[in-house]
Image: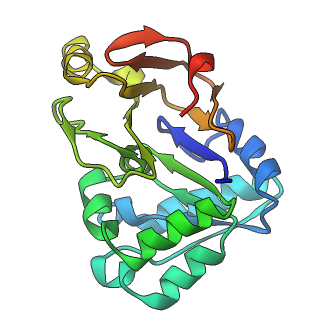
Amino acid sequence: MSGWLAMVGGAEFTPPCTFDRTLLDHSAADEVLILPTAAAYEHPGRLVDRGVEWFASLGATARGLELLTRPHALDPAIADTIRAAKFVYLAGGSPMHLRSVLAHSPAWEAIVEAWDGGAVVAGSVAGAQVLGDPMVDSRGGAFTLGLGLVKNVAVIPQHDQWSIEALHRTRVLSQPGMVLFGVDEATAAIRHPDGHWTAEGAGQVTVHVGGEPVTIDRLHV
């Protein structure tokens, strides 16, 4: 049975993200492994520092992994580190960079193996976007390829900041049966190991299946 999965809408590592304590409780992790890959060109060290400080406030240890470029993703030692983790957190930044670095790499295979082995995997903004397939292109609301840890699931992060026009376009383009989450900042759509979903955090999680609104408690994917 796979582990817990959290798709976070943004503002990660801040006090409203109460769900991180829930995820820690379910991970039984000694350490949270933060992947700042998506922020490779946006001061990744500062992002990791915020994450370390945040998880320390929750009584947990965290550290960053230098996975910033494609050569890093191909490094067997980095993949082994990910594979051994019980809580992997993909922080925000550029979804296109994150996807290009991780796609078809030992690092991505290690994330999948860790999750399949029961680890918690969380992703915020870009990190959340790439976890599904298809992936919402935040530049206009159309769909592109994601990495597909969960299939036929897409997420709009920072949903509370999206325009009505972009949201309408994404809904219209949704294929039958496809699950589309709209996740506000400091909020998470959380998949439990048995496949059902809940929402937690400061904002709202909206759900559409095939473009039609549903409640999150009806999902089992």
Residue 4 percent across, percent down from the top left: 66, 47
**How many numbered discs, if any?**
0
Q: Is residue 106 above or below residue 187?
A: below
Q: Is residue 78 above or below residue 16?
A: below
Residue at image position (37%, 48%) is 126
Residue situated in front as seen by the camera: 95 or 181: 181
Residue at image position (77%, 44%) is 21
Residue at image position (47%, 69%) is 45
Residue 163 percent across, percent down from the top left: 25, 17
Q: Is residue 79 above or below residue 131?
A: below
Residue 218 percent across, percent down from the top left: 59, 17
Residue situated in front as seen by the camera: 77 or 161: 77
Instruction: Give the image quarter of residue 178.
Output: top left
Residue 134 percent across, percent down from the top left: 29, 41
Instruction: Give the image quarter of residue 115.
Output: bottom right
Drawn side of residue 19 relative to residue 170, left or right: right
Residue situated in front as seen by the camera: 15 or 187: 187
What coloring was used for the rendering? rainbow
Drawn side of residue 111 relative to residue 60, left or right: left
Instruction: Give the image quarter of residue 170.
Output: top left
Residue situated in front as seen by the camera: 53 or 166: 166
